[in-house]
Amino acid sequence: MNVNGQHYQSIWFDESDGSVNIIDQTCLPHRFEIASLKNLQDACHAIEAMQVRGAPLIGVTAAYGMYLALREDPNQLAVALDRLAATRPTAVNLQWALSRVNAALRNTVVAERAAAALQQARAIEEEDSAICEAIGENGAVLLQEIWNAKADLSNPLNVLTHCNAGALATVDWGTALAVIYKTAAAGVPIHVWVDETRPRNQGASLTCWELAQQGIEHTLIVDNAGGHLMQQGLVDCCVVGSDRTTVSGDVCNKIGTYLKALAAHDNNIPFYVALPVSSIDFTLSDGIAEIPIEERDAREVSHLEGIDEYGDVQQVRLCPEEVAISNYGFDVTPARLVSKIITEKGVFAAEQSLLQKLRA
Amino acid sequence: MNVNGQHYQSIWFDESDGSVNIIDQTCLPHRFEIASLKNLQDACHAIEAMQVRGAPLIGVTAAYGMYLALREDPNQLAVALDRLAATRPTAVNLQWALSRVNAALRNTVVAERAAAALQQARAIEEEDSAICEAIGENGAVLLQEIWNAKADLSNPLNVLTHCNAGALATVDWGTALAVIYKTAAAGVPIHVWVDETRPRNQGASLTCWELAQQGIEHTLIVDNAGGHLMQQGLVDCCVVGSDRTTVSGDVCNKIGTYLKALAAHDNNIPFYVALPVSSIDFTLSDGIAEIPIEERDAREVSHLEGIDEYGDVQQVRLCPEEVAISNYGFDVTPARLVSKIITEKGVFAAEQSLLQKLRA
């Protein structure tokens, strides 16, 4: 992705000092800061504190976390796997990346473990970027079709997205936003409605920042607004990401995605989900019954971080002090509300008979 | 309503000094403050700055605004009507209250105008409180039926509400929350899921505060969470208010209401709208096409007010500085998603053949 005119990834390995670097997303949009991960603890903290977030990026970070752990102590393999696996419960890529690193270490002597883990992490990193670019290209075909079918070309193609499924959620390109970048690159005038995405406001803070850096026109809205915009004909399609997808096509994504899918369905607007095949959990077929939904800290709801009139980052409390709070991080959009699933392997209807063929 | 153990209304006339007093809702939940309205300008400011909000309370405040205006200058009748009518575009009660005061003044000599307006305002105030209490009683019958039909009584009756349709939105009792208060008074254990209601957070700030003061169990959630809770069987019914209702049963309420109605419909959960007959606009039958939706200041989205670690009220900015923002205040829930309309005159299906009989 482009940051102040320079190319960046969300995570990268620095050969000069053997460090793993990330864009610290907790500082955005107010400050652009790079954090350096030195050990297992740093990697776990980066995932838990959401310095990195987004299912694909969590996977890559966990793989690098294995490298950092084994570099510290090649005998802490089992401990590191357990510790990293526990950082976030919902994203399937996390488990997928750890399994892959673990499998690669099976026939590796202890002294070579760190090097082998690094090789896997770098491979996952490179593949992720290529996969996201392919997702973007496959999805752009759909959006160009909508654009070509549009009667009134005086307005841009209006796409609604939720949360941040962008370059910041992956190594580069993103999933949902890759589709937008590739559509724009194909010459389609495009405008993005950005859901702010409470409670953590990844839309307001990350997606707005990322789209501005890439020069894509966008408008910030509250999460409550999308239904009204769809009713009024102001949305041509929705594109979101997925943290975990069942083989039947149920999509587990940031809380609130389900509500937007309902509104899209009610207004005959295509609802696309862009995801790497690695986020499909081939063991699950009923997302609502089977996917555990992470409950997060009440403070994410009661307190909000922003920049005050003096330019300092401050947290303020919105609600009465003693109030009970519930904070589920994700919801499940049933396959019947998903128009198409966009992957690096092509575009599919959200149907088990099609998706199960993607199993490696 | 109960505030720190004492009975208050959201607005009241003080005979001792002829002032109109309001609970200044912009200070809640962090401070409980009373504001005194002395003239037309104060009344307009109270409505525009949302020191008072909620369709019924706006109507009463506008009626008192006419009194304050005519007390200043009995010849500014037309000016005051225009000025007050322009304060908020969506709420039909505002126009209704102004028309009623104006009608009462038709055969009043200039010198008596202020007194006649005061009489109307006090009458509207009294009626509003009685109407809301009747809405609560009528709605409580529905909620008791749900409770009586519930198989598992180990959990309370779970009701989801959006925004604040409480005593703070009316003179007393509220509309949606009146239903909850009367259900609780009938002995049903009740728990309320409170949508925070971005962008102005009336749920987090006002409804949580009001429910706590009345001793009703409640949990604050982000606006994105309701769909997930409904999928998981954690919501028995939804009760919301309405700022304007078409005679066909379309409901214009706080932005985001439509999304919750879709989720309720998708999960076979009753979606009730509690409203005074005065909020029904008998001239409209297509809410989506005909109700003008107020667009409000972008700063409501970009900035958020809360209390900092030192106990001071602060505003912080959530998003990048230069971002474009769209801020629609309301949306329209079509009648097909409304299970019942609860009024002071009884409970009705959202159907024109029934609602048009309510025309006075």
Image (cartoon, coloured by chain):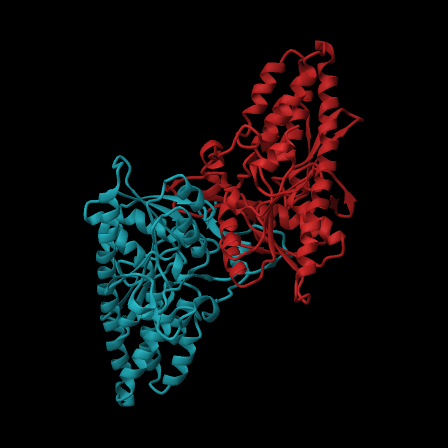
Chain colours: A red, B cyan
Answer left or right for B132 relative to A48: left
Q: As displayed, is residue B186 above or below residue B41?
A: above
Q: Position of residue A290 (x, y in %)?
A: 47, 31
Q: Residue at x 24, y 44 (%)?
A: B147
Q: Position of residue A35 (x, y in %)?
A: 68, 33
Answer left or right for B181 relative to A332: left
Of residues A205 and B236, the one drawn nearer to the viewer in this rendering? B236
Q: Quadrant of the N terminus of chain B?
A: bottom left
Which image quarter: residue B169?
bottom left
Of residues A315 and A340, the one drawn nearer to the viewer in this rendering? A340
Q: Residue at x 35, y 59 (%)?
A: B241
Q: As displayed, is residue A136 above or below residue A128?
A: below
Q: Quadrant of the C terminus of chain B?
A: bottom left
Q: Is residue B204 at least partly visible in the picture?
A: no
Q: Position of residue A280 (x, y in %)?
A: 59, 33
Q: Is residue A99 at least partly visible in the picture?
A: yes
Q: As displayed, is residue A87 above or below residue B185?
A: above
Q: Position of residue B318 (x, y in %)?
A: 56, 50
Farthest residue in the left direction?
A: B186
